[in-house]
Amino acid sequence: MNSFSKRSYIVIGIFLITALVFSLRLFNLQVLDPTYKVFATNNVLREVVQYPARGLIYDRNGTLLVHNKPAYDLLVTPREVTAFDTLYLCEMLGITREEIEAGLQAANKYSRYKPSVIVQQIPPEVYAVLQERIYRFKGFHTQSRTLREYTYPVAAHVLGYVGEVNANDIQEDRYYSQGDYIGVSGIERSYENGLRGSKGVKKYLVDVHNRIQGSFLGGEEDIPAQIGKNLTTSIDIDLQLYAEKLLQNKKGSVVALEPATGEILALVSAPVYDPGMLVGRVRASNYSMLVTDTLKPLFNRALMADYPPGSTFKMLNALIALEEQAITSNTYFPCYGVASSPIRCTHDHVSPLHVVEAIRESCNPFLWNTFRSIFSKFSSSSEGYEVWREHVLQFGIGRKLEIDLPIESKGSLPEVSYYDRIYGKGRWNALTVRSLAIGQGELGLTPLQLANYCAAIANRGHYYTPHVVREMEDESIPEKFKTKNFTGISENYFELVIEGMEQAVNGSTGMLKIPGVSMCGKTGTAENPHGSDHSVFMAFAPKDNPKIAISVYIENGVWGARYAAPIASLVIEKYLNDTISGNRGWVEERMMEANLLNPNQPK
Amino acid sequence: MARNKLWTNIDWITVILFILLVFAGWLNIYSAVYNDTEQHSIFDFSQRYGKQLIWILAAFLIAFTILLIETNFYLFFSYIIYGLVIFTLVLVLLFGTEINYSKSWLTFGWFSFQPAEFGKFAAALALAKFMSSFGFKLSRPKSIAIISLIVLLPAFLIFLQNDTGSALVYSAFILVLYREGLSGVVLFFGTLIALLFIFSLVLSEVLLFGILTSLTLLVYMIANPGLKYFFRVIFIWVSVVILFAGLNFLLKTGMEPGIILAGTLLLGGVVVWIYSARNKLKNYVTITIIFIGAILFSLSVDFTFSQVLNSYQQARIHELLGIESDPLGVGYNVNQSKIAIGSGGFWGKGFLNGTQTKYKFVPEQSTDFIFCTVGEEWGFAGTFVVVSLFVALFIRLIFLAERQRSGFSRIYGYAAAVIFFFHFAVNIGMTIGMMPVIGIPLPFFSYGGSSLWGFTILLFIFIRLDASRLDYLSY
Ligand SMILES: [Zn+2]
């Protein structure tokens, strides 16, 4: 039975060896190793979180846009607090007695032994005074933080802002703890993981008089903070400044991008606000002011507003019809007659006319006939619509473009089921949805989508996903920004619509002709039931080897050629030529001075 | 029946060890909770020490009751007790209350308890009953299957409660099986791989290396069971260790203590190795190969973990191992715990004079990290006494188990000893940074009624069985 009884020695051996190992370890820890002894003298270990500076943000030419300035928090460890001159502290910090008392109470509730922040973001000059007198306030100490500072008061919608983490952020990512900062919108949000760096810990020994005695273990156990990674955006800050200036006293947007890369050169949503308003102790009051502003400055129109594209959509309908061989370059439609009656022409021009002329003249009947021809290629309207819709989707319209900013609208491009629901299955046709032919009706494009669609035309059939960041320190930009997205429409058809766009610009008023630059563009008018129509323009330049594609929406700008087109031409000229030619100074002046904040503008 | 002789047959050494440990535990809980700004009576039942006092008195009552119950009761009802405990474990999963992310509490009005703490003695009873049944042979696959079922079922249910630490305790039963004839190879490799895996993630390389060397020595002795060699090898090795350490001390080479330890262990190993080669002892080549293999294994685990896995996967593994998350940064808990223990010095700061513990730097001060208070206030003298008391208890239990005539009592005794040992090793190991932070209590010390009662029942059933060891012939 007890044949294995000798094994009891092994079991006892295991017990003894464990006890021996523990005893040796304890002897080492408690007797030999001196590092922990310092605590015997009632010293306190203070762990101070080291907050790294966030990464810097540059524009495409290396101009610094966002950097950091120091600020300080005052912390309190309730257990260590002794009676102090409250009034003096309040005076120094410029806060009320009640605030201090409420802060102390909250800190006490959180923990008597661990420090909590009691006054946030003390400016450096106050800190200098405070630091000299901190010995009078036992239980209080400071920690340094950094706040964002902006070189230029522009591009708030791109850069975004930084705020304190909320409970949700802490739950989602264990990195954060109470009081940490996090990017709330814009680049600050979408590139948060790189920009934030990583927090460190410094351990100090502090004596009973709240004086730092030195670092614990010579800093051996400190974890250094790692500075956030720097970002280079694709924004051209001069262009951004210029575009924001042109949009002063207006609502609307400008999105300019480089067709060859998809890099966004300027992105304006007007009215703009100074990103510096949302930094530091003034943030809360400024934020509520911006939120309640009826002009909605926080709303990023460039990415979030769905405007009808108006006539700018006509090129797309023509391209789809050409690709589906519903029309050819030699198809002529007249401006008059029964076939053209559903949508009438608004002005006089040659008739009948072909596709290039139709785009030049923005001919509604031609586009209606074209739209109908697409539908009649298919056995049912819903099938025709489905094919048409697929083509539109391939231009990044009706879906999110996946730009590297946190929020964007997908615009509006109804599915077949939408019309089935309204008109009944099989009870609608091209005529029912004819407003789509001229870019009205249910269509909604964000300014970003319009600019991207323009870039796809400029590239003769493909686009790169628009993005605002060119590179991040030690990291390459995601593959999706380097991949061509093809529109599925043959290159040679693009030449026809581009020809039309060029002629449209050349045949127009002098306001948008840039000396020496072949610009291709198209005006549009977005119907607005709440006031004057919106002025729309999309363009790219030069015609060959385009450097810039742009979309401009000016709310209540009445019609495309009035505001959007001249503003776009100025932005393009500024970007290509660096300066506005002398004889166009009056255009610039007129655009900058225009105040369109009243939603009802004279026709 | 021998009721009259019961009180003389009880092993009072064990009972006294038990009382000493419980008393020492309470003192430390008192000190851990004690706050010089708020004075309370020790009977203040709103304080943890007050509550613990009630639980200790209840535990004594439970112990007394257990002693009064006939031995036959445990023998005949072991499966039923096991079944009831399994049933409550299922109830917990269905109706349990969640505290600290683990759903392991059953609440009846004001009273709540953790059934997991009672799974251990139930599993020990069932295992003892099964393995002592007539015609039982460990070598049969069916036996192994049933044993696994008995042990793993409660472990699995506890694991589902999200209390991985308490579930891991059941792995200690492998030592019982080993005593009952399980091949040493199985024990050895099973344990080695599990421990290496955990240790590679927790310990520094130097320390792991030192432990591996000691382990190799242990295995070496298993392979050469002759007592003559046992003592000789121990002697040679210990003298080399002392020599080397002494030299280091005299010459003040200023080497890291860890490196000195590892170095001496290795050097001792080398000397033993030469000795074995000359005396043509068995298996020394095999053991050397296993030793080197173990080093390579741990290095590769280390490498895989830190280089190949991303931080998310690492966190998952930590979670699976029951290693607690560390909200204040890497090793915060363990660091604070080591500081508290280390600051105690040789004699400690004295009762109620601990500062680290008062500052609440150490988390879970009165439960999982109660050993910190011992270390800080009683110094090395205190920790050494506590470690010695525990080991004395374990060895006493093994001694008692070996003197049983019935297989049932012996197996139960072993089960009790190894469960206590597992708790001891993991809990203390955790506070001194040698084990992952797995939240399991230190027997008799940690604050908490359920665990104290569970351990008391586990211990006193065996004391009762031992007191009747002469009543029966072996099965
Ligand atoms: Zn016309």
Image (spheres, coloured by chain):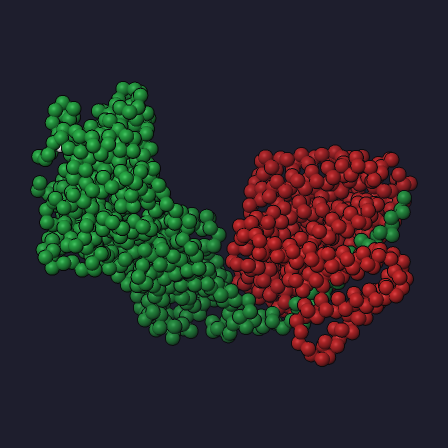
Chain colours: A green, B red
Q: Is residue B123 left or right of residue A571?
A: right
Q: Quadrant of the C terminus of chain A?
A: top left
Q: Quadrant of residue A602?
A: top left
Q: Quadrant of the N terminus of chain A?
A: top right
What residue appears at the point 28 percent right and 54 percent down from the top-left corner?
A: A265
Residue B144 appears in the figure: yes
Q: Quadrant of residue B151?
A: top right
What residue appears at the point 83 percent right and 59 percent down from the top-left corner?
A: B284
Residue A436 appears in the figure: no
Q: Is residue B48 left or right of residue A246?
A: right
Report how many numbered discs are placed on residues in the image: 0
A474 up-or-down from B78: above or below: below
Q: Quadrant of residue B307?
A: bottom right
Q: Position of residue A563 (x, y in %)?
A: 14, 47
Q: Which residue lies most toward the bottom here?
A: B251
Q: Position of residue A277 (x, y in %)?
A: 27, 58
Residue situated in front as seen by the camera: A443 or A145: A443
Residue situated in front as seen by the camera: B421 or A467: A467
What residue appears at the point 43 percent right and 68 percent down from the top-left corner?
A: A141
Residue situated in front as seen by the camera: B442 or B411: B411
Q: Is residue B148 left or right of residue B362?
A: right
Q: Is residue A402 left or right of residue B459?
A: left
Ligand 1: image quarter: top left
What residue appears at the point 75 percent right and 77 percent down from the top-left corner?
A: B247
Q: Position of residue B419 (x, y in %)?
A: 73, 49
B157 up-or-down from A202: above or below: above
Residue situated in front as seen by the camera: A379 or B282: A379
Q: Position of residue B356 (x, y in %)?
A: 57, 64
